[in-house]
Image (spheres, grey):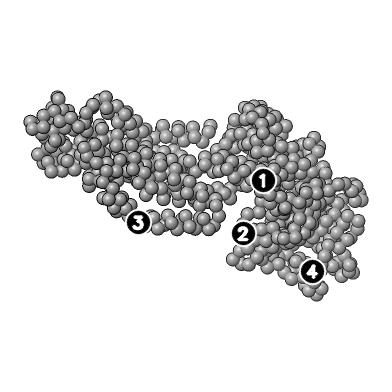
Amino acid sequence: MSGPPAPRAPLLEVHDLTVNFTGYDGVARAVDGVDLAVADGETVGLVGESGCGKSVTALAILRLIEPPGHIAHGSSVRLEGRDLLALGAKEIRAVRGNHVALVFQEPLSALNPVLKIGDQIAEAIRAHEAVSRSTARWRAVEMLTAVGIADAERRAASYPHQLSGGMRQRVLLAMALACRPKLLLADEPTTALDVTIQAEILELLDGLQQKLGMAVLLITHNLGIVAERTRRVYVMYAGQIVEEATTAQLFAQPAHPYTEGLLAAVPRLDERRERLRAIPGQVPPAYAWPAGCRFHPRCPHAWEKCAAEAPPLLEVAPGHKARCWLVEEPMRRKK
Amino acid sequence: MSPWRAAARRFRRNRPAVLGAVLVAALALAALGAPLLAPDPLAQPDPVRLQDRPPSAAHLLGTDPYSRDVLSRTLNGARVSLLVGVGAALLAVTLGTGVGLAAGLAGRRTDEVLMRGVDVALALPRIVLLLAVFAVWDQAPASAVVALIAATGWFQASRIVRAAVLSLREADFVSAARALGATKPAIVRRHLLPHVAAPVIVSASLDVGNIILLEAGLSYLGLGVRPPTPTWGNMIMDGKDVLFSAPWVALAPGCALVLTVVAFNLAGDGLRDAFDPRMAA
């Protein structure tokens, strides 16, 4: 893949999304002015370490932020042009699961332990469609077959604890996809699984995506998954998008020092190393982001300007932006 | 296997619990069958000669100071005890579940108001409240006794339910259901109530014994369900003056009372262990 992707009608357009949590330590800006777009049928990665705001972004898209958190005024989330933040309670409920579905990362706790999995999927269907119990059940079995569960008829009567982790994740996918959403927000869908099962689930997700023609926003901290499965990537740090690029651009020429750090931290097969490389320091707490560039205390290239002035997203190349002053002053980059 | 069936199996393996359940069932049958087994608890076959007679073939448990058959009265007394015990426990648990759900779901202010109200209510001695009400309300029917005992007994259940709802509300499967567009009532019905049911059933079953004792205490003091309707409490009161000359008068209802309370407690403990195996000793 090379060059920017062909421009397509945006399915999801998030603009200036800000989510604040009011707590004892002050107001935490978990998500701060995030812009992102996902086109029809596209797979987009959203990468960042724990606590950077990836999951909150996904929840905010579906307006699932609970007090003390709230989405700030001026944020906008448009799905096919419709502002989700302006919808009434009933209308947003009709969007959830039906147009945009969310898959959680923990496949055991996201299933109700006292309900049969078939009933849970049927319930997801009946939340949106006026179908009879038996039709919904029949469709649940069909979905279980579609996600590759053998003997689905019998499995539908199982309880979550009777299934393996991989099977549970398949069940969650079946639940999320039961109403054929146009967009799937997959929040670390494979984190809790071991590597071989991860690959199977991602393969399955790919297949389903082709078949249903849906777009996927893949939220992960696993750069390997990003490299394999996505066309475009957003990198998030401290509540902001710090880099936006096609996957090829990102891996070939990372522009933001944070992205460079992330890439350098991935162990490689073709290189002997005594220790894994890490980014020094820690993610600052969300109620006290550093002034200026939020990454400057951990950045190897930082100079005075970085501490004083917050950089905007600057264009590196068409379709490639980074929130870093180095884009304007590349000679400041230290070797 | 469904969690309910797993619990039922654990219960069946618990001998004391099964014994309790069998006793409860026997009591229920006796109470239901009381009108057939002992048609007239008020009959006074011979007011003078049959006073305080010891057990005999004609009167298996003897007669009381008003020459009434103690066995008939004990069987009929089971009706009041069980009706009040089970009825009030069910009503209390329903009320408590409603309030607990409201407190857990409706937001911080409602929660505060309801739970501080419960704190205050729990600080009031229940028996004194009931004494005051029944001292004024002379001829309270059994239904009023049930209602009032329930009205003063739902606080604990509301706390249990609220605590469960607060933790479940954050559960991933509830967020997942919301993310897939489930309505609030659907979440309550499908995700919250089934989880709340177990602790609530346990608390209700353990409560039955307490309520039966409470009712017996009230009727011993001559309040609540009034004589001549037989209750174990007022029967014990009838027997207290002849405790040494005719001990059977107080002993029969007393033993019935102990047996009933023990039976409910055994069954209740068994339910608790069955629903939460980690708690089992």
Between discs 4 and 2, the one toward the N terminus? 2
Q: Disc 3 versus disc 2: distance between alpha carbons?
A: 35 Å
Kindly indicate the quadrant of the structure image that contains residue A178: top right
In the rendered view, does A91 fall on the left or right side of B55? right
Between discs 2 and 1, the one toward the N terminus? 2
Q: Quadrant of the C terminus of chain A?
A: bottom right
For disc 3, the marked residue is: B124
For disc 1, the marked residue is: A90
> Which chain letter goes with mark 4?
A
In the rendered view, does A321 fall on the left or right side of B36? right
User: Residue at image x 72%, y 69%?
Assistant: A290
For disc 4, the marked residue is: A310
User: Mark 4 packing: few (<14 Cα in 10 Å), some, or many (20+)?
Assistant: some
Label 1's element?
Answer: helix
Name the front one of labels 3 and 2. 3
User: Residue at image x 85%, y 59%?
Assistant: A321
Q: Disc 1 versus disc 4: distance between alpha carbons?
A: 39 Å
Label 4's element?
Answer: loop
Amino acid carrying label 4: it is: Ala
Q: Disc 2 versus disc 1: distance between alpha carbons?
A: 22 Å
Classify A176 as above or below B131: above
Amino acid carrying label 3: it is: Leu
Amino acid carrying label 2: it is: Pro
Q: Which mark is residue A68?
A: 2
User: Residue at image x 74%, y 69%?
Assistant: A297
